[in-house]
Image (cartoon, helix red, strand yellow):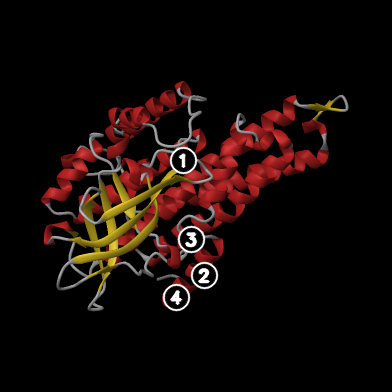
Amino acid sequence: MSAGHEEQRLFQEATDRYLQRSAGANTTRGFSAKRWAQFAEMGWLGLGLPEALGGFLTLHDAMLLMEKLGAAGLREPLMDNLILCGQLLSSHGNAAQKAVCAEMVAGKTRLALAVAEIGSRHDWAELETTLDTDAMLLSGSKCLVACGQFSHYLLVLAKETDGTGLTSIMLPTDRAGVSMRHYQTYDGRDCTDVGFDRVQVAEGDVVGRRAGGFALLEQSMLHAYVALACEAAGAMRSAYMLTLEYARTRKQFGRVLSANQAYQHALVDMYVAVEEAQGLAHHASSLLQEPSSQMARWASGAKAFACADGRLLGEQAVQLHGAIGMTEDYALGGFYKRLAAIANQYGDADWHLLRIRELDQETPHGE
């Protein structure tokens, strides 16, 4: 076994031990600063980032961690900090922005991606938020910003008023003109709506180059699609295992539920869906280092499957449990809600299938 594979094995074992110890401890909704500090101590916040910033292993390992977090039902914004903002800053940030990224890896700073807008639906590039090209003033609003309440910096995407393109900007959350409204979504995540009232932007706040934000965020969104597919695969497996255990122990009319043939068929369908979701997510993750149209197809394919079959599996698991499946004290309800949320986060199944068709029209198969 090579040194790299040995390091991966040891990391996976340490991660599994931590999640087993903390199983059932995630009883409070929302962000936990205590768990976040533990994530930093275990090195989770540096997965796939350059060693110079405190990172180690690969982006694929970060995706495998997302699957484990999905299976454990943890709600901390690892994807937004590590896989989205961290990757973006480490690759395209200036010296000061890379220093902020290193602070994130150490657990001292938290980041949030502010891209979604109420009118944009699933198309993250359809923006109303503007950056005055001459005065460098940011105006507009963003919604569903993950853990904005607990973040120190926002990565914002805005369109230049002269029509030259989109620009990515990193701003401290306490910058004058930034306003926030905090709330929790139905799956227990802390989110924030952010307003920008003529916020002054400096040239040093720009990530990459002016009007070059589309290409940067397009790559980040591919990472988001795969990360959510991996998280969904983990949540699907946990929902399936809870249903399987329930079927083997719950009796009705003197027989366990798993003795019912219709119940057995439903469990088999769930198992197949879990394996397919995991296979698609893992394959898409393995292609992340190859920025090509093929990578984009697999990212959207994995996300589309996670949207459709993930939500269907969650609904089926609740149905097979009965009323207990949606109670607050039973874990299944949390997995179902998270799968339902993933089904709409950064594009639903129909949006991603249409995206695959557009990619196929742009690039013939085999290229």
For image coordinates 60% across by 50% down, the residue present is 311
Rendered image: mark on residue 260: none
Q: Residues within 10 Å of mark 2 (few under 14, many from 20)?
A: few
**Horizontally, is 64 left or right of 187 in the view?**
left
Q: Secondary structure at mark 2?
A: helix
Q: Is residue 79 above or below residue 198?
A: above
Query: Which sits earlier in the primary sequence, circle 4 or circle 1?
Result: 1
In 3D space, how far apart are the residues under numbered discs 4 and 1 (Cα atoms)?
Answer: 32 Å
Q: Is residue 293 left or right of residue 88?
A: right
Q: Amino acid at mark 4?
A: Pro
Q: Look at label 1 and name its amino acid.
A: Glu
Between disc 3 and disc 1, whose residue precedes? 1
* Residue situated furthest top in the rendering: 21
Residue occupied by mark 4: 364
**Separation of marks 2 and 4 at Cα, in angstroms:** 16 Å
Foreground tag (4 vs 3):
3
Disc 1 target residue = 67
Mark in the foreground, 2 or 4 = 2
Q: Quadrant of residue 16?
A: top left
